[in-house]
Image (cartoon, helix red, strand yellow):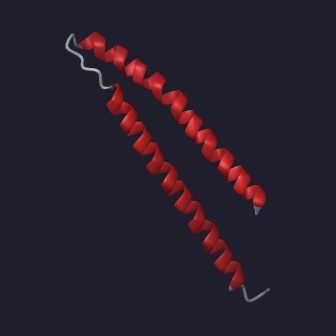
């Protein structure tokens, strides 16, 4: 059980680090493309950060809830198993 918690935690940390590494690069690339197409480009970086953080938190929360539901269903089916 403890090993599953550690591996789940390490996966979540890796996802968060990946979001923080990938997202600024993509925002920078989008800013370059936007500035090439428009001379009156506004700085949308804070908006992109907000969308990325909120979206990432929602994704992490949904992943956690799904994992907990899976583990609960698995435990419930093990308790109701007539062969045990």
Residue 83 occupies quadrant: bottom right
| In the rendered image, the vertical position of residue 65 relative to residue 43, given as above or below | below
Left or right placement of residue 80 versus residue 56 in this view: right
- Above or below: residue 28 compared with residue 2: above
Q: Position of residue 32 (x, y in %)?
A: 36, 14
Question: Is 77 located above or below residue 63 in the figure?
Answer: below
Measured from the top left, where is residue 38 in percent x and y?
22, 13
Residue 21: x and y in percent read 54, 28
Q: Residue at x 77, y 59 (%)?
A: 2
Query: Would you place residue 38 above or below residue 26 in this image?
Result: above
Quarter placement of the N terminus:
bottom right
Question: Image quarter for residue 51?
Answer: top left
**Position of the C terminus by quadrant:** bottom right
Determine the residue positioned at 21% across, 10% down: 39
Residue visible at 58% across and 41% down in the picture: 15
Name the side, left or right, on which 45 lies relative to 19: left
Q: Position of residue 66 (x, y in %)?
A: 54, 61
């Amino acid at each position: 059980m403890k090993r599953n918690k550690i591996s789940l935690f390490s996966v979540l940390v890796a996802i968060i680090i990946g979001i923080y590494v990938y997202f600024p690069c993509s925002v920078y690339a989008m800013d370059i493309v936007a500035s090439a197409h428009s001379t009156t480009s506004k700085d949308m970086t804070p908006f992109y950060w907000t969308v990325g953080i909120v979206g990432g938190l929602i994704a992490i929360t949904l992943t956690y809830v799904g994992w907990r539901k899976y583990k609960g269903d698995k435990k419930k089916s093990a308790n109701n198993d007539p062969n045990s």
